[in-house]
Amino acid sequence: MHHLAALQCEGLTIWDASQDRVFWSDLYLLFPTADGPALIYWDGLVGHCSKNGYRIYCGVLGHQKTRQTHYYPALLKLHDCACAGSNHPDYNAFEIPLGGSGDYATNLCWLLSASNQSQFEAREMEMGVTKTPLILGLEPSHSLGVPICMTTDIMHLAGNISDLLISFWHRMITCTPSDDINTWEWVVLRGEDAFSAHGAAVGDSGHHLPSSFDTKPCNLAEKINTDYKTWEFQLYMFGLGPALLYNILPQ
């Protein structure tokens, strides 16, 4: 980062051997990429388990359970158990605010003006900012700045969604004592026979895919805990799954 900052101020000297001339090139930082946990080292924002933990800083707040510190990126308010600080209304999935809140600079200044550690930690949770990121030390005209430059994590999105939904459908997930798995109407792959049949259908569907997919997906039931790859989860979640579970999953 120090080297990049220096080159942005002085320019990068390059010799064009084909024309025997020297010119100066400007360097720009557009989109640093990282997964969710690593991104906080780039942007100085809180982690994905925090109240204001959305990585593109869109202002959407998470929800938590009573007497719990972990916030979830749930758009809907919990029924009958929304605790203080987590009782904001539902968010419409089709009206999510755009990333890059215009309040970022104001929120950062408010955080840094905290007079003691307790006040700093309270503002940190509320604003979703933990520190001044190194990116702000770059030349402003040569960077998109925080939080505009932050990117999303589509690879882990596919894997996490697949893991969660398959666990729901196959009854491989635990719940709190106030809930009852036996009442879940979406457990449609209950038992090894149903899951094995579904996994075999996923593997057999590969014969109907065009050659641009390179290779057909593996049997989901046989490879889910060992060799299932990200592209296979993406294909299953957004392509094969909706077709194979049509009229099986409840409305």
Image (cartoon, rainbow, N blue to C red):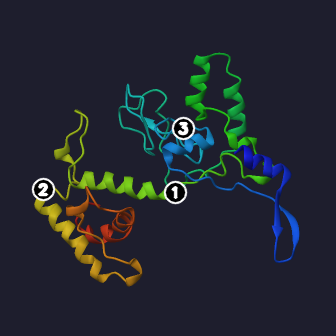
Using the numbered discs, state the Cα–Cα distance from disc 3 to disc 1 in whole angstroms. Answer: 19 Å
Report the mark closest to the observer, 1 or 2: 2
Q: Quadrant of the C terminus?
A: bottom left
The one nearer the camera, 80 or 46, is: 46
The one nearer the camera, 6 or 158, is 6
Q: Which circle marks residue 191 in the picture?
A: 2
Q: Is residue 100 left or right of residue 80?
A: right
Identify the amino acid type marked 1. Answer: Phe
Q: Amino acid at mark 3?
A: Asn
Residue neighbourhood size for the residue with mark 1, other residues' Cα within 10 Å, grouped as few (<14), some (14–19), many (≥20): few
How many numbered discs sit on the rendered protein?
A: 3
Sequence-earlier tag: 2 or 3:
3
Task: Give coordinates of residue 158: x percent, y percent.
Answer: 41, 58
Left-right relation of 86 to 16? left
Disc 2 marks a residue whose amino acid type is Gly
**Mark 3 burial class by Cα count in 10 Å: few <14, some 14-19, many 20+:** many
Mark earlier in primary sequence (3, 1): 3
Front residue of this view, candidates 250 and 215? 215
Q: Is residue 143 above or below residue 20?
A: above
Looking at the rendered structure, the secondary structure element under dot 2 is loop
**On the image, numbered disc 1 is attached to which residue?**
94
Disc 2 from disc 3: Cα separation: 38 Å
At 50% from the left edge and 51% from the top edge, which residue is drawn? 92
Mark nearest the camera among 3 and 1 is 3
Residue 219: image x %, image y %? Answer: 23, 68
Q: Are marks 2 and 3 in contact (CB under 8 Å)?
A: no
Q: Is residue 23 above or below residue 95?
A: below
- Tag 3 near tag 1, CB within 8 Å: no
Q: Which mark is residue 52?
A: 3
- Quarter the N terminus occupies: top right
Residue at mark 1 to residue at mark 2: CA–CA distance: 35 Å
Residue at the image position 32 percent from the left and 53 percent from the top: 163
